[in-house]
Image (spheres, rainbow, N blue to C red):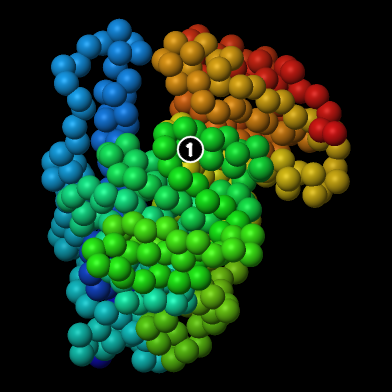
Amino acid sequence: MRNHDAIVIGTGQSGPALARRLVAAGQDVAVIERKLFGGTCVNTGCTPTKTLVASAYAAFLARRASDYGVTIGGPVGVDMKAVKARKDAVVEPSRLGVERSLKTLEGCTVYEGHARFIAEKKVAVNGSELAADRIFINVGARAAIPPIPGLEHVPYLTNSSMMDIDFLPAHLIILGGSYVGLEFAQVYRRFGSEVTVIELAPRLIAREDADVSQAVADFLKEEGIDVRVSSKVVGVEKRGNAIAVKVESAGAVSQVAGTHVLVAIGRRPNTDDLGLDKAGIATDARGYIQVDDQLRTSAAGIWALGDCNGRGAFTHTSWNDFEIVAANLLDNDQRRVSERITAYALYTDPPLGRAGMTEAEVRKTGKPALISTMAMEDVSRAYEKGETKGFMKILVDRDSKQILGASLLGLAGDEVIHCILDLMYAKAPYTVMQRAMHIHPTVSEFIPTMLGELRPLQ
């Protein structure tokens, strides 16, 4: 039995940073990683997918060159092997950097293998048994595979296996019309694939407001993506070199034939083979580790951070989990998950930046509120760049004058949203930003204008 002061299981966004803080505090730390250092974000999530988004945007813009008075000789082509090579070149330094930083960290011992609890405060890895008074779980999540008849008999793709593709799928069928599915849909359509998106719900990205969903569907369809909503996949089968997907919609069953299928219907936590029951760690019905407001599990001295705790499925929420745990344990600074404001982005082009509540959520509260909207075609910066798809929407509490939420679908929406997010954290009235002087020409300069044009939410 090897004793450590702390054990960190997993090296996503939370784990390595926490290990460094614990070592700096004089603790002897063990870090366990079973596969790729850096977790989902570095290897199969944010870093590689946004690199692909950048390549797809370059191809899209090149095809539009004449709109800007630029002449390109001949048709625009996409070299998928070069696209993948660029993606790999971006990912590898990040992954190796995480691995190297941990393996050279004095006071940190790295174990490569699968960790399983064998008792409270005890973990086995590669035949060795480790013990520590504090254990931190940062094991992430993976694609959920639904029980669709026939799916197990076809070579389907997930967000992870998509990272190995160095060719152009002739026709990519995507099961799931939410964030992961839509980003891949637009990327591969811009690379040159035919793309079909099949979504069970009545609209895409159903957690967003209907006007946001419709606007996203509109620009995806305009690019030639076949979007099918209110459609249930009832079967999948191999047909020669093709894959046939059976879809039930409005009581009728039809088929979509493609060359490749991407399953993007949700995520599940990597908690089913950790032996959590041996340590008395409770999970919910979906397998997420149950945690309190300071990310403590049901077992004393054990915390869960990142995607596996169900308190956020983003790199930034995982990083914030690290900040919360480190502050509470090492800085005598009591921080809580409930203090953070919901914020995320959808990296289609144009992107969607989100903060706080949706319009639908505000309406459910029944509280009097104000709203302001602006079409991106009215934003000079967007008009100048020839990127006028989308709109911006801000909601404000009428009485407190604090911003309740915003949806910014348009040019730089993923960056501009932070103007609003920071004001929300400051709990300042919207009038502070309304009176601010922003730089012209930018997208951000129209936020004060919008706040000066608030109207009652009917």
| Dot 1 amino acid type | Lys
- The quadrant in which residue 74 appears is top left
Q: Is residue 94 left or right of residue 275?
A: left
Does any portion of residue 406 appear in the rendered image? yes
Q: Which residue is mark 1?
A: 221
Rendering coords of residue 353 (x, y %): 53, 37
| Image x and y of residue 91, in percent | 21, 49
Judge by depth and name the residue closer to the eye, 326 or 434. 434
Q: Write the residue at 42% across / 64% down.
A: 245
**Residue 322 in view (yes/no):** no
Does residue 297 appear to the left or right of 94 in the view shown?
Answer: right
Please, is residue 450 above or below residue 98 in the view? Answer: above
Identify the residue at image location x=70%, y=21%. 451
Q: Position of residue 289 (x, y in %)?
A: 51, 74
Query: Is 140 drawn above or below residue 173 in the view shown?
Result: below
Q: Secondary structure at mark 1?
A: helix
* Displayed quadrant of residue 284: bottom right
Check the picture and name the quadrant holding the C terminus: top right
- Picture residue at 30% right of the left edge, 7% below the top: 69
Q: Please state the total of marks drawn on the protein image.
A: 1
Of residues 267 and 449, the one nearer the viewer is: 267
Q: Is residue 1 above or below residue 288?
A: below
Query: Quarter-wise, where is residue 348 in the image?
Result: top left
Quadrant where the N terminus sits is bottom left
Identify which residue, 109 or 329, lies in the foreground: 109
Q: Is residue 5 left or right of residue 339?
A: left
Horizontal and vertical percent position of residue 5: 33, 75
Q: Please tell me how crowded label 1 is: few (under 14), some (14-19), or many (20+) other residues with Cα within 10 Å.
A: some
Seen at 27% across and 39% down, the residue is 191
